[in-house]
Image (cartoon, rainbow, N blue to C red):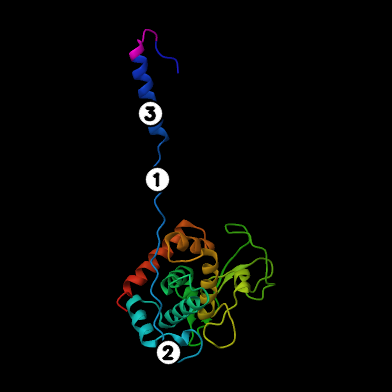
Amino acid sequence: MVLPAGRDGMGRVKTALALLGVLLLAGCTAAPAALPYAEQAPPPPTGGTGEGYTGMVDPAWAQRVAEATGIPRLAVLAYAGAAIRAAEVYPDCGIGWNTLAGIGLVESDHGSFGGSTIGDDFTVTPPIYGVVLDGGDTEHIPDSDGGAYDGISDYDRAIGPMQLIPQTWESWPSDGDGDGNPDPQNIADSAIAAANHMCRASGGMTTPDGWRAGIAAYNSGDDYLTKVADAAQRYVSSAGQY
C-alpha cells in the first residue's frame, strides 16, 4: 500500500499497526462449535426368559422405559437386546440402547415410517425402503445385492427400520429375536447389525470422539449426528431413573 506524501515516521508506524490490526481481525473466524455427543445408557437389566437377545431383556424394565420415552415397547426390546449383544461381542464398545434408539427414531421413527408397524415378531409391515441411491440428489451406490434385499437391481437403497444399505447388512446379518431368520426388516435383527457396524468403526462409543466416529460411519452428516445425539440424550435422560 502506498502511504500519503508528507507522513512522518511515527505516522507510518501507527498506520502500519492499524493496518495489521485490520488484517488480523479479517483473518479471525469463530472456532467451530463442537459437535454434540450423547452419554451412553448403562447396560439394560436382564432377566427375561424369551428367545434371542430381545428375550433376555427384563420385560418390566422395557415397559417402564417405553412409557417414559414414548418408544414402542418392541423397539425398546430390540435396541436393548442389541446393546446386550454388543457388550458380549465388543466389550470395549459400550454402545447404549439409547444411541440405537436415536438412530431408529431418525431413520424410521422406530419402524413406523410410511405407516409401517412392528409386529410381535419384530418385523415391520409393510417393509421400509429408502430412496434409490442413483446419484441424483443422493449418493451413487450401484446395485450390490441383485435386489435380494431392496427389491431393485439397478442401484442400492437403504432397507428396514434401521435403514442399512444392502452391503452393510450383508456384512452383519444378525438374528436378534432368536427366530433363526436374519432379516433387515426385523428391528431386532437390524439393530444388532447397526451396533456391529458402529462398534467396529468407532473403536468404542463411550468417548465423545469415539461416539462421533461411530455415528459418522453410519451417516457422515453433521445435521444427522446432531439429531441422533439430541434424541439419544433425551432418551437416556427420560429413562435415567430406570
The local crowd at label 2, few if under 14, some if 14 to 19, many if 20 or more residues have their Cα within 10 Å, is some
Which residue is drawn at the image coordinates 38% and 28% (left, top)? 22
Name the residue carrying label 3. Answer: 22
CA–CA distance in space, label 1 to label 2: 48 Å
Q: What residue type is labelled 1?
A: Ala
Which residue is drawn at the image coordinates 47% and 84% (left, top)? 54
The quadrant holding residue 101 is bottom left
Give the foreground label among 3 and 2: 2
Q: Which of 121 and 175 is in front in this view?
A: 175
Q: Which amino acid does label 3 sit on?
A: Val
Name the residue carrying label 1. Answer: 31
**Number of numbered discs:** 3
Does the magenta-highlighted stretch encompass residue 192? no
Q: Is residue 150 visible?
A: no
As drawn, 92 above or below 72: above
Q: Which amino acid does label 2 sit on?
A: Gly
- First in sequence, mark 1 or 2: give its number: 1
The answer to whether residue 192 is left or right of residue 241 is right
Secondary structure of the residue carrying tag 2 is loop
Residue range corresponding to the magenta coloring? 5-10
Q: Nearer the viewer, residue 135 or 14?
A: 14
The picture places residue 194, in percent across and down from the top left corner, at: 53, 72
Q: Which residue lies furthest to the bottom in this view?
A: 49
The picture places residue 38, in percent across and down from the top left corner, at: 39, 65
Magenta-colored segment: predominant secondary structure: loop
Q: Which residue lies furthest to the top in this view?
A: 6
The reply to whether discs 3 and 1 touch (Cβ–Cβ < 8 Å) is: no
Does the magenta-highlighted stretch encompass residue 7? yes
Name the residue carrying label 2. Answer: 48
Where's the N terminus, which quadrant? top left
The picture places residue 207, in percent across and down from the top left corner, at: 43, 63
